[in-house]
Structure formats: structure tokens, C-alpha cells
Amino acid sequence: MIYQPLGAEDAARAIEWLIRADPRGHWTGFTVDLGAESAWLLHAMYELPGFPDLTVDDLTQRSDFPDGEVGDMLAEITGTNVPSELVGSPGPEWRRLAWADVVTVPFSDQPYAPSFRWLNNVRAAGVQGPPEGSMDLDTLATVAEALARQSPDQQLYAYYAGHAEWAVRHTSTTLSDEPIVFSVDPDKILDLAFETSPSNIWPADHSWCVSTDADLSATFVSGPAELIARLEASPDLELIRWSPSRDE
């Protein structure tokens, strides 16, 4: 088996524990804190070196896009360079841009979870911002490998928040109140890379949970110290330890 959509009753049972953890997560994704180790994975963003110092708003008022593929790619993201779907690097000319090089307020002083609120400069036309509500492809691939190593012998599950129309193509559900849940083998998580990454991924024993909120630009992971350490050691991830201020 690669992946299998669960029927309505099985799907409802599968997410009962997520509802207990976050009763309001049906439409944006359940944020599950297991009280163990945890970290945030900042979704990747990219910049085009040497591109003129223009904002996306500036670019929408100009007709002189660069010729060729770079111009086409910039035209596609004009108007909003913060994707809301599963994307990777726009092309070989682009390079990874670290959040630490963009965020002007220290991570630890941020009152809100990682999102557009942290990023003041992603309106630059030569920047593809971090996806909102989905991991980027590179982050998902790295996380999928770590999860498979963490729980190689368990059945994994994936939940998709809301009822996006694309889900109808992969399941028998309708756009109703039926939750969209898949069971998946540990080494096949990337096969669930549809239009977005899953909102939640977890193993049968509920020992860890991956949570991607529809309104955020980062993914929360809670679980054993071994899993968090493995993610933290990856050079392909930008991982931070963040928690909201007690004063908020």
C-alpha cells in the first residue's frame, strides 16, 4: 500500500485525539503539543540574486519584465509572492534565503507564531516568500525522511484541514463535513504531496505530531527528543525553538 483514504467513520475516529488537543483545528489544521520536545520548521523562501530592488507592487505597475524564464516566474508570483501551496525553488538561478537574514525582530521576541507578521521584506519582487499553510517541497522531503526513520514499523496518518476541492480527486469524500484522512506507509509520505502538504501527520501510537496551520508559514513538530534532534541536525531545515510570550 502507498496511501489509502479512510472512510468517513474511520477518519472521524482517527482525528478524535487531534480534536481533544485542539478543538478548533478542523479548518486550519490541529496544533498538537504533546508536552514533550518541540520545534518550528520555517518554510523555505528564495531570492533571485541581482534582481532590481523593487517590490511586487512596483513590478505590477511595470511592463518591462525581464525576458525568458525568470520573467515568467516573476510574473506568476506578482501580486502575492507568498505561495499558498506546495512549491519548491522557482529555478536554478534562485538561492535559499534564511529567515534570520530577513526578520528584523529577534525570534524570541515575536508575539505571534511564524507567519507574514515576522517578514517585512518578502514583498521584494526578487523574493519568493515561504509557503503559507503548506510546507515547501524541500522541507517536506527532509521531514518525511526523518519521520520514516523515527517510526519505520508504524502506520502513519495524514489529515488535510478544510475541504479543498482538489481532495475530491484523491478521495471519495464530498465537500461536506467529512474529514479527509489518509493512512500511509512510513516511506511513502511524499506520495501525499498533493497541492499542499498535509495539515497533520502522526503515527499510530501518537508519539509525535507534525502540525501545519493554514495561516502560518512554519510547521510545528512535537515529539520525542530523538526526532527533534534529528530535524535540528539537518542542514536542509531552518529550525527554531519558539513559544508565545506568557504575557500574550
Image (cartoon, grey):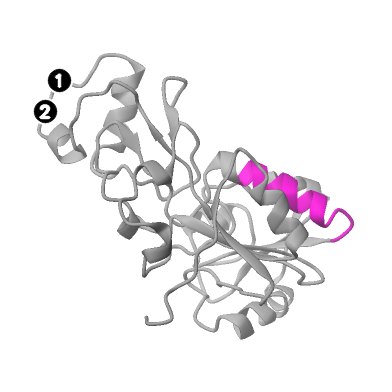
> Could you say whether the residue bearing mark 2 is in a helix, strand or loop?
loop
Q: Which residue is mark 1?
A: 64
| For residue 157, above or below residue 19 | above
The Cα atoms of the two marked residues, 2 and 1, are separated by: 6 Å
Q: From this viewpoint, is residue 90 visible?
A: no
Q: Is residue 77 left or right of residue 141?
A: left
Mark 1: which amino acid? Asp
Magenta region: which residues? Answer: 140-154
Q: Which residue is mark 2?
A: 62
Image coordinates of residue 92 in percent, x first then y, are 47, 20
> Could you say whether the residue bearing mark 1 is in a helix, strand or loop?
loop
Taking the view exactly as shown, the residue that stands out farthest to the left is 61
Residue beneath the point at 76% across and 46% down: 188
Q: Nearer the viewer, residue 125 or 79?
A: 125
Image coordinates of residue 11 in percent, x first then y, are 69, 73
Image coordinates of residue 208 in percent, x first then y, are 72, 67
Label 2 close to label 1 by CB (< 8 Å): yes
Residue beneath the point at 66% across and 77% down: 35
Picture quadrant of residue 23: bottom right
Residue 237 belongs to the span the image colors magenta: no
Residue beneath the point at 34% across and 27% down: 73
Mark 2: which amino acid? Arg
Q: Nearer the viewer, residue 142 or 246?
A: 246
